[in-house]
Image (cartoon, rainbow, N blue to C red):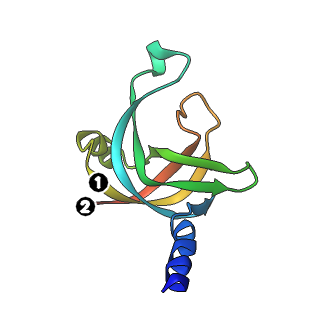
Amino acid sequence: MKKLLIAMLALIPMLSQAQTFYYGKPATLTGKLLKIKSLHPNQEAFGGNQIALALDQQVNVDGDEGLVKTKLIQLVDYDDARYSSLFKKEGKSVQIKCSELFRSHTGHHTTKVLCVVDSVRYK
């Protein structure tokens, strides 16, 4: 019985490890939609709110740009209607399929990692 308990306790850290995704690759993420304030230095022209995904669990994103551990990923969507609808669904649980993940590199990027939205499924 003691051996079984020890084996189960040894497995718990392995089950709770963060999932690893890679820059430039597709990813499926789950969490809640959250409005975040832009950190752009020109708030008058480019300030305001952006939409992000507050992840259910921390993830690792790795690649040439280096490893990032995060629980918040800004969403980018080339479908304007779908992007606008995400703001109206703030707080809703979703599954987002990203066509790719990329690291922030401009003033419009508020989180360290961004997701190009491919599809959204509300839970």
Kind of element beneath mark 2: loop
Residue 18 to residue 75: above or below: below
Q: Nearer the viewer, residue 7 or 92?
A: 7
Identify the residue at horizontal 24%, vertical 44% (top origin). 89
Q: Are marks 2 and 1 in contact (CB under 8 Å)?
A: yes
Q: In this view, which residue lies farthest toward the right?
A: 64
Work out whether 63 lies above or below 91.
below
Residue at x-position 60% and y-position 55%: 60
Percent position (x, y) of residue 12? 51, 69
Q: Is residue 64 left or right of residue 122?
A: right
Residue flagged by tag 1: what amino acid is it?
Answer: Ser
Q: Separation of disc 2 and disc 1 at Cα?
A: 5 Å
Where residue 11 appears, x then y in whole percent?
55, 74
Say left or right for 20 vs 52. Answer: right
Q: Secondary structure at mark 1?
A: strand
Q: Nearer the viewer, residue 27 or 55?
A: 55
Give whichever of discs 2 and 1 has the lower sequence position. Answer: 1
Residue tagged by mark 1? 93
Q: Report the residue marked by disc 2.
A: 123
Name the residue: 60% across, 62% down: 20
The residue under the point 68% across, 56% down is: 62
